[in-house]
Amino acid sequence: MSVLVVGLSHHSAPVRVLERVAITAADVPKALHALRDSHTVREAVVLSTCNRVEVFADVDKFHGGVGEISDLLATISGLPLEALSEYLYVHYEDRAVQHLFTVACGLDSMVVGEAQILGQLRSAYGVARREAATGRVLHEMFQHALRVGKRARTETGIDRAGASLVALGLETGSAALGSLAGRSVLLIGAGPMGALAGASLRRAGAGSIVVANRTAANAARLAATLDGHAIGLDGLPAALTEADIVVSATGATGLALPANVLTAAIRARAGRPVFLLDLALPRDIDPSVRALSGVTLTDLESMRAALATAQAGREVEAVRCIVAEEVSVFLAWQRAVQVAPTVVALRSKAADVVDAELLRLSARLPDLDARARAEVATTVRRVVDKLLHAPTVRVQELAEFPGGHTYADALRELFGLNPAMPSVMSQASLTADLDTAAGGAWPATDGSADLGAAS
């Protein structure tokens, strides 16, 4: 396993840089194909959310993998690699597994414990799988990560450790406007974040809700669930003059609300205050509108400081313990899996040697009766099986510890094994060969079956 993570997040980069690197859902398949077409990447998953862009990959070479993934992110961002590199982090092998499990549990999120990241990881893996960009390594790793994330939320209160981005943003809105009950709302974007914001506002007693979206059907669908009504993006100027709360989460590459549009709407409001919540990455709302009278704007950048003080203690520590435990379990399993081909190759080679010697003995002693032939075969196979039992069991036990693969390396060197090409000779073909040579078969026993399988 040579798993590599290269990425950047709210921990390492400002929003202006994250905006440049953000990969839209439509562009993720192209990024995956570019990675798979590179020289060193065997498998890849791209995770792009509102506060992180990360590439998980199984690579042939560490430095080559880091270089190729970094080049791709620099190309996407349009930034020189030297400028982007200061914001990138790299995790490899054990640290890569730990990072993925930490992300799955929400410990690395802007809001600790937030539940959305688990769905985002599942979606990212699903896209990679559909694009044939994953194989056994990332499949096992992501499946385990999803189980760890679910376990953390089931066994601890980590998902209640901090409010969601939406809830935290709306708290700022309450501070600016007072009670949200009865307030008119404009949602721009009908995706998951827009739906979450709409549901939260409806529970808070908001008044009329208007949903604006590029796709009219999506806007209508969300509006129906919120007892609101839908409009097209061409209706935004008029809707902005009426709404007390505007939540924007479009996922578009340009500004959904540029300064000139908002400036015109603010003038038409005749001094009525408005709260703007920008949940998009790249951002939807021009930050310069903060200078306008009566405008309160909260975005991902401005929420960062507040979130830094909202980390919960006991729940976080409990989840860190779960992550450490699960990382150990996964790595032990991975090491055991890596050793298994060597064990199979050793037992297969031993079985081949036993079969060849029994064949030779059959030719030299053709007059042995069936009972004697069976007794000899059973004895020889039992002896070999007992000799192999301790080293094969022990090498699998040792593989569960760091550096355990070196024992498998020693076995391969000492016995001249090629784990990629274990014997696949069937018992049926072996029996046919022995019958042809000696006019009778050495009987198969349970011992011979064991010789061909890992203990």
Image: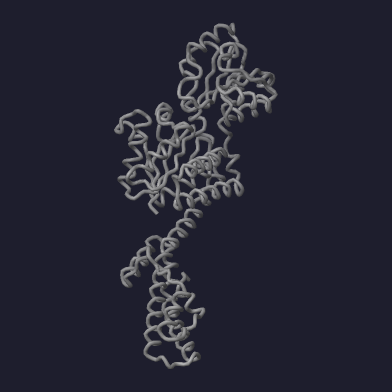
Residue situated in front as seen by the camera: 420 or 296: 420
> Which residue is rendered at x = 45% and y = 47% of the image?
134
Q: Considering depth in this image, is 216 or 181 the residue closer to the camera?
A: 216
- Please state, as top left, top right, bottom left or bottom right, where the N terminus lies in the image: bottom left
x then y, percent, for residue 242:
62, 12
Specify the quadrant of the image occupied by residue 267. Answer: top right
- Near-viewer residue (337 or 130): 130
Colour pattern:
one colour
Across and down, in percent, residue 176 comes to 59, 19
Q: How many labels sit on residues? A: 0
Residue 204 point in image, percent of width and height: 67, 26
In this rendered view, identify the residue nearer to me: 293 or 215: 215
> In the image, is residue 24 above or below residue 421?
above
- Residue 210 placement (x, y as % from top left): 63, 19
Which residue corresponds to the image point at 41% horizontal and 26% vertical from the top-left?
16
| Above or below 214: residue 86 | below
Q: Name the side, left or right, on which 317 lies relative to 69.
A: right
Q: Is residue 402 left or right of residue 186?
A: left
Whether residue 444 is situated above or below residue 392 in the rendered picture = below
